[in-house]
Every structure is written in C-alpha cells, then in structure tokens.
Amino acid sequence: MNYPAITRDKIPFEVLKDEEVLTEKEARRSRQTKLLRAAQHNRIFYSKATIVFETWDGPKEVSANIWEVTDKNVLLKGGVNIPVCCIRDVVIESDN
C-alpha cells in the first residue's frame, strides 16, 4: 500500500470520514472478516495490522495492534478508535 503512513497517536487529530467508504456489500463483509482475523492474530501472535482508512485529506495508513472490533469501531492499542465505516482495507503484517 502506498498511502501516507501516520502513527497511531496521530489518529485522534485526523478528521475521519463518517460515511461508508465501501459501496459493495461483499467488500464490507470482507473488511469485517479481515478486522476480526487481525484482532485474533494480535491476541495469539501479538501481530500488527496495516489499516488503510479515509480522512477528509485523503487515504492514510497506520500499522497498529487491533485490540477489539465492534460493529462500529476498531479499538487499537492505546485506546485509539477508528470508525469501521472509514476503513478501506486491512492487511495482517505477520504471516504466522
């Protein structure tokens, strides 16, 4: 992925999109599956995931540990939340 990378600590200062960025139902289902898998990998292998998300300045990416996934939010290490609706893609960094 070739988007501007930011640190997890900078996410609260970004203006994230509050509307759904994926138009297809299958893409949204795939995103949810990837998020849940990334959270599970973090619990088992302590592996990070790269998350591509939409801000009003354009797409950005962050490499972080996903602690929890709900229907509406993703909780990262350090208590940082990202709304699920603004996430474009998730890639698990570990290949365990």
Image (cartoon, helix red, strand yellow):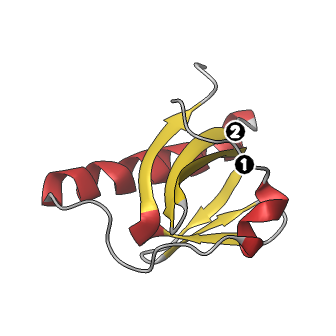
Query: Label 2 vs label 1: CA separation?
Result: 4 Å
Residue 65 got which mark? 1
Secondary structure found at label 1: loop
Q: Callout 2, which amino acid?
A: Lys
In this view, 24 is above or below 63:
below
Farthest residue, direction front: 57
Find residue 18 and report its horizontal and vertical position in percent.
Answer: 44, 80
Residue 67 higher or lower than 82, as above or below: above
Whether residue 66 appears in this view of the structure is: yes
Q: Position of residue 70 (x, y in %)?
A: 49, 73
> Mark 1 Cα within 10 Å, few/some/many (few <14, many 20+)?
many
Residue drawn at (61%, 75%), measured in percent from left and top?
A: 15
Query: Residue at 79% of width from left, 50% of height from top?
Result: 7
Q: How many marks?
A: 2
Instruction: Kindly indicate whether the residue at mark 1 contacts the one at mark 2 (C-beta within 8 angstroms).
Output: yes
Badge 2 is on which residue? Answer: 48
- Split into 4 quadrants, where in the image is the C terminus? top right
Q: Relative to residue 19, is residue 12 drawn left or right?
A: right
The image position of residue 73, as x and y in percent, is 53, 74
8 is higher (above) or lower (below) than 85: above
